[in-house]
């Protein structure tokens, strides 16, 4: 009986690990990225498990969605969908050439 329980626990851990790997492999961002330019305070908080984001400019927040397609990111806020250039290098993302570092 103990061997049966151990096998189930190990199987559950393997399945959980695989699920986490598949989620992290997609075109999703997770976490908060802050603009390196100190003259303006802009941040993006991306949800890893959905397409939601919160864009903050100073203390004003805007809820929206995002979609990444190769070197483009599409950000929709208040039904206004905009295309931006996008790239990622380690903990830094670049949107329209501006660097945003992960918090």
Image (cartoon, rainbow, N blue to C red):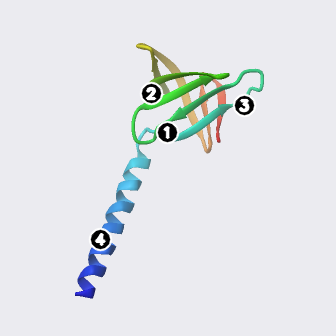
Among numbered discs 2 and 4, the one appearing first in the sequence: 4
Q: Where is residue 87 in the image (x, y as percent from the top left)?
A: 56, 32
**Disc number placed over residue 36 in the picture, else none:** 3
Query: Which residue in the structure is indicated by mark 1?
Result: 29
Give the alpha-carbon distance from disc 1 to disc 2, as whole Å: 9 Å
Q: How far apart are marks 2 and 4 (CA)?
A: 34 Å
Quadrant (top left/top right/bottom left/bottom right) for the C terminus: top right
Q: Are marks 1 and 4 in contact (CB under 8 Å)?
A: no
Q: Are marks 1 and 2 in contact (CB under 8 Å)?
A: yes
Residue 57 shown left or right of residue 85 in the figure: right
> Residue at 49% across / 39% down in the picture?
29
The CA distance from mark 4 to mark 3 is: 43 Å
Residue 66, numbered circle: 2
Give the alpha-carbon distance from disc 1 to disc 4, as whole Å.
28 Å
User: Quick one: label 1 or label 2, which is nearer the N terminus?
Assistant: 1
Secondary structure beneath label 1:
loop
Q: Residue at x 40, y 13 (%)?
A: 79
Q: In this view, does 7 lie above or below 46?
A: below
Q: Do the residues labelled 3 and 1 touch (CB within 8 Å)?
A: no
Which disc number belongs to residue 73? none
Which mark sits nearer the N-terminus, 1 or 4? 4
Tag 3 secondary structure: loop
- Which SS class for mark 2? strand
Residue 80 seen by the camera: yes
The numbered mark, 4 or 3, whose residue comes first in the sequence reads: 4
Residue labelled with disc 4:
11
Q: In this view, does 62 lie to the left or right of 1?
A: right
Q: Is residue 20 above or below residue 100?
A: below
Residue 75 in percent (x, y) is at: 47, 22
Q: Which residue is drawn at 22% across and 87% down?
A: 1
Residue 68: quarter of image: top left
Disc with the residue nearer the chain's start (3 vs 2): 3
């Amino acid at each position: 009986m103990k061997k049966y329980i151990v096998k189930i626990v190990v199987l559950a851990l393997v399945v959980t690990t695989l699920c986490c790997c598949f989620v992290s492999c997609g075109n999703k961002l997770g976490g908060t990225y802050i603009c390196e330019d100190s003259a303006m305070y802009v941040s993006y908080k991306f949800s890893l498990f959905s397409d939601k984001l919160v864009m903050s400019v100073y203390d004003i927040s805007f809820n929206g969605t995002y979609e990444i397609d190769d070197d483009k990111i599409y950000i929709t806020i208040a039904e206004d969908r905009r295309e931006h250039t996008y790239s990622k290098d380690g903990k830094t993302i670049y949107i329209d050439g501006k660097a945003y570092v992960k918090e």
